[in-house]
Image (cartoon, grey):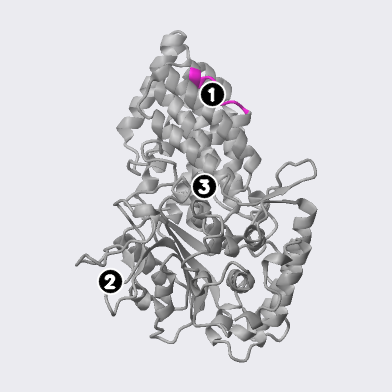
Amino acid sequence: MVRGARQPQQPRSRLAPRLTGTVEKPPRKRRSRTEFALKEIMSSGGAEDDIPQGERKTVTDFCYLLDKSKQLFNGLRDLPQYGQKQWQSYFGRTFDVYTKLWKFQQQHRQVLDNRYGLKRWQIGEIASKIGQLYYHYYLRTSETSYLNEAFSFYSAIRQRSYYSQVNKEDRPELVVKKLRYYARFIVVCLLLNKMDVVKDLVKELSDEIEDYTHRFNTEDQVEWNLVLQEVAAFIEADPVMVLNDDNTIVITSNRLAETGAPLLEQGMIVGQLSLADALIIGNCNNQVKFSELTVDMFRMLQALEREPMNLASQMNKPGMQESADKPTRRENPHKYLLYKPTFSQLYTFLAASFKELPANSVLLIYLSATGVFPTGPYDFGGVLTNSNRDIINGDAIHKRNQSHKEMHCLHPGDLYPFTRKPLFIIVDSSNSVAYKNFTNLFGQPLVCLLSPTAYPKALQDQSQRGSLFTLFLNNPLMAFLFVSGLSSMRRGLWEKCQEYLRKINRDIAQLLTHSRSIDQAFLQFFGDEFLRLLLTRFIFCSATMRMHKIFRETRNYPESYPQLPRDETVENPHLQKHILELASILDVRNVFFENTIDDY
């Protein structure tokens, strides 16, 4: 994730771990650490000559591995944030050293306890660093299985109470380490949809913060309380609850499952392009966020990933045991998460993705951002990717009375150079229609999916909890329930509706591939599972809104470039019948028009 000139994987800059330092290990520093450890040994138990040579070597080797691991870890920040190849060998070395360090402290725990004075919180710090490594590796590779590995190490810290003795020491910096660990653990659990664990962690973190601020009277109390508020709002962002029979909440996952995308019929003629890279950009003012990941960014991130699998049985990576089984097809598109990027940063990442895009691959750009409206007769406006000033009501910025243009506004024309390769654009903004006027200069496949620019006033305002358009692309059934006025549902009915929605998706896929007038760009993207699912969900979203009684203005409907043939897709009678049947299952048919085409 990128914001400004730093990597915001953690909740706040002051509360985030400092990843500064150099890669090379200064020999003098290593010797001084070892000498310090040996002096501690002597002071706690007799003369240095009384210490067996083997035990002294164990302490020396441990100090060396500890130093080396810290220096490699600190060097992570010096790695380029973009590009997919420069960092891999460095990560491999870091994994190797931490693997050795972890095994070494396990094998020599008694000697290190007696001679080095190894404390449990120090073991916890090593485990926490390994968890961070796996999390960073997930961010670099988009392979969700690494989240499971990060969760394993973070969970072990909690289960084994590695940080339990920290509160007894009069050292606030150690307590901050513990609080940061909780914040990181929460991020990983959110990404894995382990909401039950998140709620437990939030309660524990709240107690820890209260104890910390009471004991040390520190200045960062407000920031830590803000972390709690952010995560509390984040886990309540979904507008609909799915309930078990005992009224416990069902945790639903919106990543791509094996049966998620509609299968292609035999003989369907579609393109062979595959989604390789995605830029997920967020700059919606006042939208709920945690760890500088907005709700919209979070939802789109999950829509572009497969369900996590057990890494140990699927992958062969540094620090892991080799597996005899070859991994199944697990590719996720590589992603950059850009929170409030400046124009120059956004262009740098775009250029890096464009440069490294393999042959027959697609670059996806997702923009969830405030609209910037036109200031002249030849200007369509765009979307704002970075805002440092106050925004009135968190809505669109108007500059009609100002002579200069907004520097960080991304105009459609800014993306023209990147249309030299296949480009798939999603714009969720109050000025998304600016991208309706796109120009395809190079003849490469190009599609833009554009959100409504306004929603009916009769619809409950949920903008702070994420956009309705993005919710349709991430979890179409939940979005359908929300526009139908439902806030909760039993699990059995939910699963029945999900099955019916899969049938609708299959029929939408057939409508697209059988259409005689559809632009070929849609079909060229249709061979990729992720893009196929996004396209079918987009059509379902558009058809639902056009049939809904309170969505009556043109600006309430999604648009696309190129335009879809309405009578064969979003206004197709067969699809409209399916939507009414879904509404009947939910007993909300009254909120939709029956004879939709006649109402236009």
The secondary element bearing badge 2 is classed as loop
Answer above or below: position of 175 versus 347: above
Task: Tell me if residue 10 can be seen.
Answer: yes
Residue at the spot 33% in from the left edge and 26% down from the top edge: 32
Highlighted magenta segment, given as a residue range: 160-167
Three-letter amino acid code at disc 3? Tyr
Residue 48 relative to residue 110: left or right: left
Count of labels shown?
3
Query: What x and y, as percent, mark residue 271?
Result: 58, 82
Q: What residue would you read off at disc 1?
A: 120
When asked about the image quadrant of residue 353, the answer is bottom left
Determine if the magenta segment contains residue 166.
yes
The secondary element bearing badge 1 is classed as helix
Q: Main secondary structure of the magenta part?
A: loop
What whole-number distance in Å separates the C-alpha atoms at marks 2 and 1?
A: 61 Å
Determine if the magenta segment contains residue 206.
no
Three-letter amino acid code at disc 1? Arg
Answer above or below: position of 355 versus 324: below
What whole-number distance in Å separates the C-alpha atoms at marks 3 and 2?
A: 43 Å
Answer above or below: position of 66 versus 392: above
Q: Earlier in the sequence, mark 3 or mark 2?
A: 3
Marking on residue 135: 3
Q: What residue would you read off at disc 2?
A: 375
Query: What x and y, as percent, mark residue 240?
Result: 65, 52
Residue at the spot 62% in from the left edge and 85% down from the top edge: 567
What whole-number distance in Å separates the C-alpha atoms at marks 3 and 1?
A: 22 Å
Name the image quarter holding the C terminus.
Answer: bottom right
Verify CB contact (< 8 Å) between mark 3 and mark 2.
no
Q: Earlier in the sequence, mark 2 or mark 1?
A: 1
